[in-house]
Image: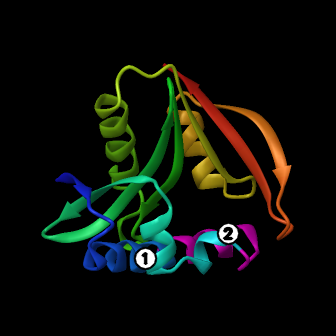
Amino acid sequence: MIRELDMADSDAAIKVLRLERRAYAVEAQIIGSMALPPLRDTVDTLQQCGERFFGYFRDGRLVGAIAYERDGQALHLCRLIVAPDCFRQGIASALLDFVIKQETPISEIIATTGSRNVPAVRFYERHGFYATERIQTPEEIELTTFVKEI
């Protein structure tokens, strides 16, 4: 079941933070850098980020989350998180599909991931995204921006 998360509720923010740390620790291993900015998030930074959050629950447990910001007709995916023990079970796809249906009308979705995060790159490509640019962060992490036109 997917439902909106009220990040003003500290319990919800704590659950997202725990999920985020587990998921981004896997990405950090894949890309070879523990300097990923989401690994420095706190309950406060999650509550103050201004993103809209939805969670995927299985048996009452938060196993996935998506967060985004809307800018006119563009949707900027800020986070797409899945519990490591639930990888490759369709959760990320379900969250992405849910948001696309939730936020109509939109003309494009923009997402960024570590260029060396092959599973994430393949995920976006499978869902019709194409790479538009690569950037280097101050933490020396190469990121690829993907766009999907709707």
The residue lying furthest to the left in this view is 59
Q: Quadrant of residue 5?
A: bottom left
Give the CA distance from mark 1 to mark 2.
Answer: 20 Å
Q: Is residue 97 left or right of residue 28?
A: left
Q: Is residue 89 left or right of residue 139?
A: left
Q: Nearer the viewer, residue 20 or 58?
A: 20
What is the number of the mark on residue 30? Answer: 2
Q: Position of residue 75 (x, y in %)?
A: 50, 35
Q: Which residues are magenta?
A: 23-35
Q: Secondary structure at mark 2?
A: helix
Q: Position of residue 21 (x, y in %)?
A: 50, 78
Q: Is residue 93 left or right of residue 12?
A: right
What is the number of the mark on residue 17? Answer: 1
Point 14% across, 70% down: residue: 60
Q: Position of residue 44 (x, y in %)?
A: 46, 77
Check the image and report above or below for 47 versus 71.
below
Q: Are marks 1 and 2 in contact (CB under 8 Å)?
A: no
Q: Residue 88 colored magenta?
A: no
* Residue type at tag 2: Ile
Query: Which of pointers 1 and 2 lies earlier in the amino acid sequence?
Result: 1
* Residue type at tag 1: Leu
